Image (cartoon, helix red, strand yellow):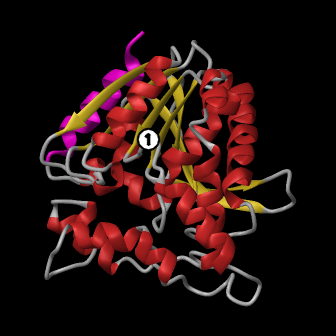
Amino acid sequence: MEQIEYKTKFGDSLKGNQRIVKDPKAIIVIVTGMAEHSERYDDFSNFLNANGYFVYCLDHYGQGKNGELGNPCDDYFFKMVEVLNDFISEKKAEIGKEVYMFSHSMGSFVAQAYIEKYSSNISKVVLCGTNGRNPLVKVGLLLAKIMVHKGNRNKKAKFLHNLSVGAYEKVVKNEKSHNAWISYNEDNVKCYDEDPLSGYRCTNGFYLKFLKGLASIQKSKNVDAISNSIKVLITGGEDDPVGNNSKGLSKLFKLYKKHNVHVSLKIYRNMRHEILNETDHQIVYDDLLNFFEEN
């Protein structure tokens, strides 16, 4: 693993890491989830690297070493879409290989926005730990617009946190950790709990902009814009509260199918939000590798 720093067209920079090999099959860009960071994908990245792929992973604004944890820049959701496209375009031109994307959780919603705008720039994308249309997003956005102001924008969220992550915590009650909803694998949950760069509470401003991003995706005209040339895999755990116990994955799959997107669906039984970190993760690794390698 080698740390990198990417200077954006916005005058700032994002840190992350890369793994390179000689004569790669393709480039895989990983887009991480909320309240975590790129180094949590070390094992999966090493697996992809060992199978012949360049792997890049940029931390989001307000994540990892990119500023104050959980307090990203204004409009970070839409900025991340643009940063990813610039980064992918540069790497594609530099290396001369196709680009694939693996996205997880919050990253999967950024990826949805990305392929609605720039699907012709990548060949395959995995939307992991994601969700389909959720009518509560509009309600949450309305509440956030009412509640969030200059005086509390940079303060850690309470009410908005409880509406989102707090709701997942209540679904999976566990005396050992309130983060048990992310995984059946207790070792993974323990590592997440003990990681100073994970599990932090995000600000009111974060939720306002995140909800704004969520409200912008999955509109018919946007989904229609997704190129038929891109292959999409929607995947996640059957017991993941983010995807409404896989119902949201099926809903997104049907939406994409309706709009003639080249999409497939894979749901894993006895897995929660982080299918890459469950005890049986090798099954997931192999399935994802097959998706990246199939014609």
Give the main secondary structure, helix, strand or loop, of the magenta stretch: helix
Which residue is found at the position 45% from the left and 60% from the top?
39
The percent position of residue 155, horizontal first and vertical second, equals 62, 87
Which residue is found at the position 71% from the left and 38% from the top?
85
Identity of the residue furthest to the bottom in this view: 151
Residue 46, placed above or below residue 158: above
Under mark 1, the amino acid is: Gly
Magenta stretch in the rendered image: 280-295
Residue located beneath label 1 in the image: 132
Which residue is more in the foreground, 6 or 165? 165
Which residue is found at the position 43% from the left and 41% from the top?
132
The percent position of residue 120, horizontal first and vertical second, equals 67, 21
Q: Is residue 288 left or right of residue 39?
A: left
Which residue is more in the foreground, 132 or 138? 138
107 part of magenta stretch: no
Image mark count: 1
Instruction: Name the quadrant of the C terminus.
Output: top left
| Element type at mark 1 | loop
